[in-house]
Amino acid sequence: MQGESNLNQLIANMQPVLKEPVFVFVTLPKGQSWRADVHPKMVFMEEEGTTLIVEREVAEAQRWDYAFPCRMITLNIHSSLEAVGFLARITAVLARLEMGVNPVSAFYHDHLFVPEDRADEAVTALQQLSLQCRLKD
């Protein structure tokens, strides 16, 4: 099953959806594990330690230090892992708004983690970008 790779089609049809709850980024020392009832949204192992994206309430319950309280925006279009420029175009729009974003690409969709207090603004900007692209076609 191959995803969309045409940049104009991706932008025009991306359908950004804001998800609950608030997520945070946590880093655990290399080799440290987490309890089975902790269900990270993402796990990435780096030389310095393991990064988890978890719900803020989970991090607080575990008494973990965390950073970047954020909301997740899912771009509801099946994007190809080989698509060129999709996230670059999207992150450029958010950069013009001086908004940090942490994108995560999974097999079916791309997900953007944006500051909790600016999530609605990010969705509006992405909807406008999508509309502009549709009107050009």
Image (cartoon, rainbow, N blue to C red):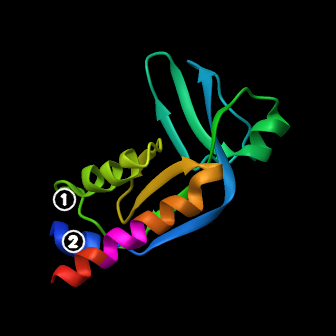
- 98 over 3 or under it: above or below: above
In the image, taking residue 118 as reference, residue 90 lies left or right, namely left
Q: Is residue 39 visible?
A: yes
Residue at numbered disc 1:
83
Q: What's the mark number on residue 60?
A: none
Picture quadrant where residue 16 is located: bottom left
Between marks 2 and 1, how big is the CA–CA gap? 7 Å
Q: Residues within 10 Å of mark 1 (few under 14, many from 20)?
A: some
Segment tinted magenta in the rendering: 126-131
The residue located at (65%, 28%) in the rendering is 33
Residue at numbered disc 2:
4
Question: Is 129 covered by the magenta stretch?
Answer: yes
In the image, taking residue 50 as reference, residue 106 lies left or right, namely left
Q: Main secondary structure of the magenta part?
A: helix
Element class at badge 1: loop
Question: Is 8 covered by the magenta stretch?
Answer: no
Q: Is residue 1 visible?
A: no
| On-image quarter of the C terminus | bottom left
Q: Marks 1 and 2: in contact by CB < 8 Å?
A: yes
The residue located at (65%, 51%) in the rendering is 117
Picture quadrant where residue 130 is located: bottom left
